[in-house]
Amino acid sequence: MAAPLARLVLLLALGRPLISGAQATEGAAAAPHRRFEYKYSFKGPHLVQADGTVPFWVHTGNAIPSADQIRITTSLKSQKGSVWTKTKSMFEYWEVEVTFRVTGRGRIGADGLAVWFTEEQGLEGPVFGAADKWNGVGIFFDSFDNDAKKNNPGVIVVGNNGKLLYDHQNDGSTQALASCQRDFRNKPYPVRVKITYYQKILTVLINNGFTPDKEDYEFCAKVEDMVLPSQGYFGISAATGGLADDHDVLSFLTFQLTEPGKEAPTPDAEIPQKDKEKYQEEFEHFQQELDKKKEEFQKEHPDVQGQPGKLFELFFTADDVFETVSDRELRQIFEGQNRIHLEIKQLNRQLDMILDEQRKYVSAVTEEIAKRGAGFPGQQGQVSQQEIEAVVKTQEEVIRQVKEIRSSVTDALRSISGGQHAGSAGAYETTQHFNDIKEHLHVVKRDIEHLVQRNMPSNEKQKCPELPPFPSCLSTVHFFIFVAVQTVLFIGYVMYRSQQEAAAKKFF
């Protein structure tokens, strides 16, 4: 039983990369030219100047710049702060990478953090510390659940033409162009978000801070046909309310995107000659300071010249080189939890792909209902419309079941993240969570089998109505068989991985 199941899982896994590889090749062929823009970026160390300002940026409110980060708000009630670029961007398409931490002692935080691209600077206001009625886009990392729908923390993309007031009571859900539910508070590593605006498509990718891999991004939201101002200010703001978190921004990196075939502007063409001379003078000054420090060190330590071993012993002790038994055990536990997290995230991605396919199918059927209602009135159109509505309802039921699987996996992921510092007891709790996931998957499997049996006709096979635009039509029975096979393969994969993880935990 295990060998055929493993082969089926392998075939399913091999079927996916063929499409992904073609998409990757097509995306690589149309990849834009990417150039770093230092005047619209900041990053530590040595972030601030001697007068406490950040080069090319202005900070307002309760924002506090330091050597390696900018604390937008402290964990005090009713705080507001923001940082904005001093000059407008001169390029149409762009990409920003923001690294931040949101930490607090409470189980629930408030209010949240926002990344902005607006026509004018929103230095201070009621929307996460920035001004309302902005012309541009805001990507909100909302920590507090104002509408009591239990969908926070979450990421919300809200556009504005300069006339709309932000809907605080509903957490912007009535104005959201796209959103995703992600927990970005109190993570072991900084959270990273990549926001890309290219060819009127806004894409948001997020690294949720569970791994040290900086490029471990996952899809969050996408908005198509989005028109933004050709020139604008970049900014980041935060606010606290009755509850409070520390909102720290470690870096804000901006890149200009140029379409393939267009000539990318040279960096030297945009730097005035006076600035070039200033930067060259500063470089020579730093070089002289470095040479002076080297000479002072050689005078103070003449015995370590030409002997790297002594220089190493001078700065490092045995405790820095060798780890203790407890440190090694903690490291092994953390690595095991990290591997579990990666596997669960891979399952989450597969569930996202299944949900996208189901949504596409439902939208196609819905469009067909509208076409047939307009082109074929009468009794025949009414009968076929009822059949299609039955298929749509069944698809919605399947989507609901898959969403329940995703919520179960998300709950397990949160439990794992909460137990990363709990030692061996956390490993036992992780096993219990995987057993709970297995039980939920069994329930979903039975429900889907009941759905398939209920929708299978007893006497003859139902056929889709023949439509002139389409050469053929997929029958309902074939579709449910495909869904059932995919679900069984997914359940078998989860059971197989849980057995592997249970065997691996014997070594801890």
Image (spheres, rainbow, N blue to C red):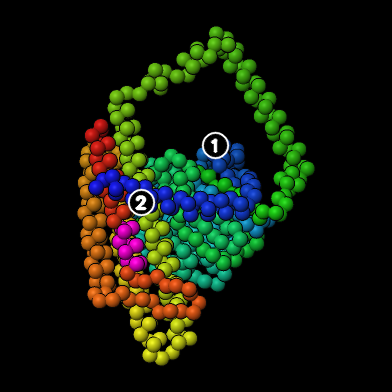
Per the image, label 1 sits on a secondary structure element best described as loop
Q: Give whichever of 325, 152 is nearer the camera.
A: 325
User: What residue sits 64% from the left and 47% below the top?
Assistant: 35
Q: CA distance from mark 2 to mark 1?
A: 37 Å
User: What residue sits 46% from the left and 45% below the top?
Assistant: 216
Q: Position of residue 251 (x, y in %)?
A: 53, 45
Amino acid at the residue labelled 2: Leu
Which label's residue is closer to the chain start, 2 or 1? 1
The residue wearing badge 2 is 347
Relative placement, left or right, of 83 versus 454 is: right
Q: Is residue 171 magenta?
A: no
Amino acid at the residue labelled 1: Pro
User: What residue sits 27% from the left and 67% below the top?
Assistant: 452
The residue wearing badge 1 is 45
Q: Give whichever of 294, 432 is nearer the camera.
A: 432
Q: Give whichever of 386, 63 is nearer the camera.
A: 386
Q: Main secondary structure of the magenta part?
A: helix
Q: Which residues are magenta?
A: 478-487
Seen in the picture, residue 82 relative to 397 is either above or below; the reply is above
Seen in the picture, residue 383 relative to 18 is either above or below; the reply is below
Quadrant for residue 476, please give it.
bottom left
Q: Give whichever of 424, 296 is nearer the camera.
A: 424
Label 2: few (<14), some or many (≥20) within 10 Å?
some
Q: Position of residue 501 (x, y in %)?
A: 28, 41
